[in-house]
Image: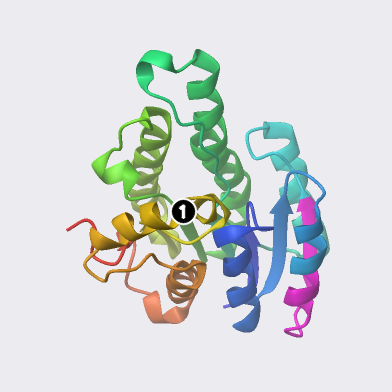
Amino acid sequence: MSKVALITGATRGIGRQIAIELAKAGYDIAMNYRKENEELVMTKQEIEAQNVKCLAVKGDVSNWEETQNMVEEIIKQWGEISVLVNNAGMTKDKLLLRMEKEDFESVLAVNLTGTFNVTKNVIPYMMKKRQGRIINISSVVGIMGNAGQTNYAASKAGMIGFTKSLAKEVAARNILVNAIAPGFIQTDMTDILKEEVKEEIAKNIPLKRMGTATDVANVVKFLASEDSSYITGQVIQVDGGMLM
């Protein structure tokens, strides 16, 4: 199986680590980003240090035309995309009573419609090759819900339904579609929390710690590999046992 991976939202946090770990496994990396930033340059350098090729592709996944152009650019450069990781996401947390219509729609536009846009543009090339891996980064919040996150929970639950349905559609073409549902993961978003809040979170996790971006990236690496050739339509929780 060829090794060209597209990771959306790849310049920071979980997406960045997924790109680096797949690069270590020998994948050429197409790293999607929305805005120019310092992390973009640093991540590209770290990927290329693994002796693989790296293509930075700009595009807002919620925008159909930008997504189409992004995928076409990768195909023009490398001729295929063998692994797609739909990781780009956003939050706009508010209780529903205070949530504006734009808060709801913008989160679904990136998290759920974005997953549709990228996958819809990539899937014809995978179908033609009769092989591929699609890995959607959902969340345990999409399974259990969370107060103040009706928009985010709806988008991540939608990704799970999308994953299972697409897995049934494309299995005959040897395209595997799975989702990962991370729990509390150490990222820029959790770094701003007070230490006592982090400790309280850890208390409620059986493994007594938050996860790392590498914990998630390692599961992506497994699902992208031939070792996972009989796994499709699944949701794998990476949450330290938080939700059982």
What residue sits right under mark 1 in the picture? Answer: 136
| 171 relative position to 43: left or right | left
Three-letter code, disc 1:
Asn
Question: What colour scheme governs how the chains and residues are painted in the rendered image of this protein?
Answer: rainbow
Q: Residue at x 55, y 44 (%)?
A: 89
Q: Residue at x 35, y 46 (%)?
A: 160
The answer to whether residue 108 shows anywhere in this view is yes
Q: Residue at x 59, y 75 (%)?
A: 22
Along the line of sight, the residue nearer the viewer: 54 or 184: 184
* Location of residue 201 in the rendering, given as x and y in whole percent from the top left corner: 32, 55
Q: Is residue 37 magenta?
A: no
The relative height of residue 151 versus residue 129 in the rendered view (above or below) is above
Q: Residue at x 71, y 60 (%)?
A: 31
Looking at the rendering, the stretch of residues picked out in magenta corresponds to 44-57
The local crowd at label 1, few if under 14, some if 14 to 19, many if 20 or more residues have their Cα within 10 Å, is many
* Location of residue 211 in the rendering, given as x and y in whole percent from the top left corner: 40, 67
